Amino acid sequence: MNHQDLDSLRQKIDEINLQLLDLISERGQLAKQIGEIKKMQGINRFDPIRERRMLDELVSKNNGPFDNTTIEHLFKEIFKAALELQEDDHRKTLLVSRDNQRENTIVHVNGALFGNGEPHFVFGPCSVESYEQTDAVAKSLKEKGLRLIRGGAFKPRTSPYDFQGLGFEGLKILKEVANNYQLAVVSEIVNPSHIEKALDYIDVIQIGARNMQNFELLKAAGSVNKPVLLKRGLAATIEEFILAAEYIIANGNNQIILCERGIRTYEKATRNTLDISAVPILKKETHLPVIVDVTHSTGRRDILIPSAKAAIAIGADGVMAEVHPDPAVALSDARQQMDLEEFEEFYEEITAFLRR
Ligand SMILES: [Mn+2]
């Protein structure tokens, strides 16, 4: 074969490529139209029986050189792409998505504007244990000009025999202390029926990692006019996390703060693995503010400062961490909470990093 033959054969291949592209595009347009009709009729877009028939027909007409398995594989990819084309359209309509709203949603909490481009902070004890304990932390927060306090009153614990929290008694303590220092209260609610009553005590409803897919709770939080701090489930993908937020917004509440708090991996050096790249992905895919909980993601006091800096550097809208006046005697998460002195150093380092 001489050089000219090769050139003309390649030219033919180029022409066929373009013809295939035209045909695949035309096929895609038709599939989209079918998808629209199916949507109107409420029929499932994926139709395995029809796909089977199309593959059988193609295989029966196949005269080579590709074997039947290859033909089936190639066409299945085309079918899949057509189906994804329809699903992508659906994804674009998610209310939390950047495609739906270009500008950042800004969540206002006691003068802290989450999503305005500056980092904001959520600190406080893991659990509310007593008035004195909560007061000691709140005092330290107020001295630093901070605006929020977190504290758990309802604690979903791994073991039923571990401290379950003080319940509404804990919320009352939080509310009283927060009022004394003009702080806003962030606290977890675990039961949808508690939300109405809890509104009197809290400024931000936290939905914890273990409840990220508690859909009744998400719907209940979505139906009230109160900011929601939604934590990523410990084994949830980013897509599942986004869809959990969609449950809240779909029920009418767009005041949502997403919180990356580490995911479960095989790594044992940290309590969870801080999925730092989730932050820019969530910022890109959604218009919601994203904060990072450095306490639960790492479970290690000794790396809280670099982890918080990393969160800010990568574009997080805030940092969350746990502070306790005497972590050694804490009723939950004793090993990972900062004492007030450590908190002092932590906050100084972070604010110096911000001023840089
Ligand atoms: Mn905790």
Image: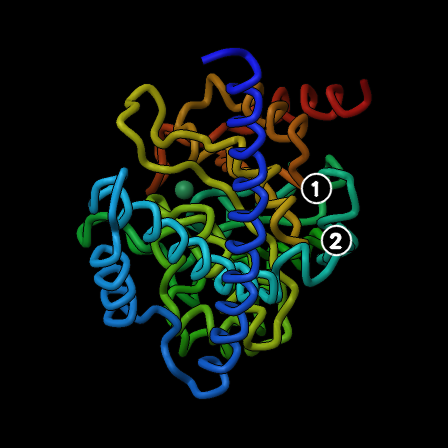
Q: Amino acid at mark 2?
A: Asn
* Residue identifier under label 1: 120
Residue 232, image x and y in percent? 44, 48
Q: Residue at x 55, y 12 (%)?
A: 3
In front of the other: 47 or 186? 47
Work out which quarter of the rendered image holds the N terminus and state it. top left
Q: Amino acid at mark 1?
A: His
Q: Residue at x 42, y 36 (%)?
A: 262
- Give the spatial CA distance, label 2 vs label 1: 15 Å
Residue 138, image x and y in percent? 62, 44
Q: Quadrant of ligand 1?
A: top left
Q: Residue at x 71, y 50 (%)?
A: 114
Work out which quarter of the rendered image holds the C terminus and state it. top right
Above or below residue 57? Residue 241 is above
Residue 166: quarter of image: bottom left
Above or below residue 140? Residue 180 is below
SS for tag 1? strand
In front of the other: 110 or 102? 102
SS for tag 2? loop
Above or below residue 16? Residue 3 is above
